[in-house]
Image (cartoon, grey):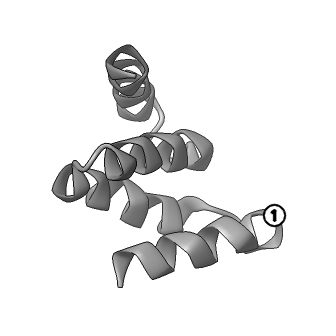
Amino acid sequence: MPEAVERWKRSVALNPEDYQTLFNLGSELWQSGRRDEARPYLEAYLRAAPLATEARDIARVRRLLE
C-alpha cells in the first residue's frame, strides 16, 4: 500500500486534524513494521479523535502505543 501511504501523508499535511486519515495512515505504517514512523500519526489521532464515536479505536491505539 505504498501509494495509499503517500496519499494519506499528503492528506494529513493539508488537514492535520483529519482523525480518520491519521488513524488509517498510522495503522498501515504500524502494520508494515514502520512503528517509529507510525507513532506521531497515531498520537495525533488520539488528540484529534472524538471519544464518542471512536472509543474502540482510541482504546486499541492506546494499547499499541503502550
Per the image, label 1 sits on a secondary structure element best described as: helix
Residue sitting at x 30%, y 52%: 38
Task: Specify whether 56 is left or right of 22.
Answer: right
Looking at this view, name the residue that lies furthest to the left: 36
Left or right: 14 as drawn, with respect to 57: left
Residue at mark 1: 53
Asked if residue 10 is positioned above or below residue 16 in the image, the reply reads: above
Residue found at x 29% / y 61%: 39
Please state, as top left, top right, bottom left or bottom right, where the N terminus lies in the image: top left
Residue 25 placement (x, y as % from top left): 43, 40
User: Which image quadrant for residue 53?
Assistant: bottom right
Position of 42 with respect to 34 (left or right) is: right
- Residue furthest to the top: 3
6 w.r.t. 60: above or below = above
Count of labels in the image: 1
- The answer to which quarter of the image holds residue 49 is bottom right
Residue type at mark 1?
Thr
Residue 43, x across and y down, in percent:
38, 66
Residue 8 in the image, given as x and y percentages of width and height: 43, 28
Image quarter where the C terminus lies is bottom left
Q: Nearer the viewer, residue 65 or 51?
A: 65
Residue 36 against residue 51 in the figure, above or below: above
Q: Position of residue 61 (x, y in %)?
A: 50, 70
Q: Is residue 50 left or right of residue 25?
A: right
User: Neighbour class for label 1 at 10 Å: few (<14), some, many (≥20)?
Assistant: few
In the orientation shown, which residue stands out farthest toward the right? 52
